[in-house]
Image (cartoon, helix red, strand yellow):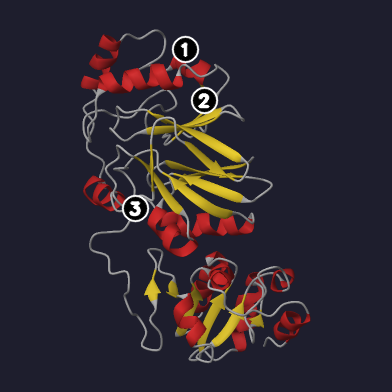
Amino acid sequence: MLFRQLFDRESCTYTYILGCEKTREAVLIDPVRGLYDRDASLLEELGLKLRYTLETHVHADHVTSSGLFRSRQGSQSVVSEAGGAPCADVLAKHGSVIRFGEEQLEVRATPGHTDGCVAYVDHANKRVFTGDTLMIRGCGRTDFQQGSPEKLYTSVHQQIFTLDDDFAIYPGHDYKGRTQSSVAEEKALNPRLGGGKTLEEFQQIMANLNLANPKMIHIAVPANLQCGVMPEEDATEEVKAWAPITRTAEGVPEVDVAWLSGNLGAARLIDVRRAEELVGELGAIAGVEHVVLDELAEAAKGWDRSARYVVICRSGGRSGRGARILEEMGFENVVSFAGGMLAWNHAGLPVVSGTGAAAGAAGCG
């Protein structure tokens, strides 16, 4: 199984990519909205098709990007049935199995930090993604969001500590730079739950933490109950008159497949993929100019900065970076094609490939 562990410095959140090496289907565990571009780009670079975003619970310290991935890449959001998130495509139950390609994860309900906490168990590779239920030498707090020290103690001892001792533990957060632990380590060394701590001892520990509320709780919880859609957000903000352009949370200007397919003559089309991708299975849009992303800034030096440009790639990650590069160079009318050639092909729109795509690419300026 392909595996990546990623980190958000703002909330100290870990995001995990798991992918099937054979089918290239993938899942994202606990993605962060502010890092959508990073995660989308890595999925694209690794050639992965995102099938699910998996939440370990409804977070209070960051906003998920599950809604963005669903709207742009067609993935499904998975939240516990006890999480209270009506936006979810899949309401996971204790014992549910999440399948992607030839890989799978078992869902284990682990309430205590919140009622909707779950752990995802990768039996084949002996690892468990514990969210905030069990962290390295710690655990999630139990003083808000249906928190219960009794439930958390039971969850850890019945659902996580019952796994084999050599199971690797991958938590939802770490604040000291630690990346993983093991069941054996936490059973022995966790100062709250390990070393034979009784429920009464654990209750006393949790009652005396006296922690401040997460600074984003009043924003994050309502947004995460809607899969990361911010309550005050206008998802169709028009920032330029020449097209229905929206801005992502990261500031990337985008147009969708419906507009682009009906307005192919409205702008120069710049495809920033590698040359071999233009003649690959996704093909290319007729008339594109080919400039690989790494060469875009240099190639664009002589371009008309008042002209209109649509930057294109496989799924929207590289084209988003390309659009920002051009904007930073002073280009006034530039957008990224949201969803890229994956969205174009999904819509059944025509492409050129083989010698046709090569000829189109050769004419770039």
Q: Position of residue 24 (x, y in %)?
A: 63, 51
**Could you say which is closer to the camera, residue 27 or residue 7?**
27
**Secondary structure under badge 2?**
strand
**From mark 1 to mark 3, how far is it between C-alphas?**
37 Å
Any part of residue 293 in sight: yes
Q: Residue furthest right?
A: 355
Q: Position of residue 330 (x, y in %)?
A: 48, 82
Q: Look at the image and tell me in which quarter the C terminus lies.
A: bottom right
**Could you say which is closer to the camera, residue 102 or residue 165?**
102
For marks 3 and 2, the one nearer the N-term is 2
Q: Position of residue 45 (x, y in %)?
A: 63, 58
Tell me the tag on residue 181. Answer: 2
Task: Name the amino acid, label 3.
Answer: Cys
- Label 1 neighbour load within 10 Å: few <14, some 14-19, many 20+: some
Read off the residue under disc 1. 188
**From mark 3 to mark 2, how far is it between C-alphas?**
29 Å
Q: Position of residue 124 (x, y in %)?
A: 61, 30
**From mark 1 to mark 2, how far is it between C-alphas?**
11 Å
206 horizontally vs 69: left or right: left
Task: Name the amino acid, label 2.
Answer: Ser
Tell me the tag on residue 227. Answer: 3
Q: Place residue 49 in its image quadrant.
A: bottom right
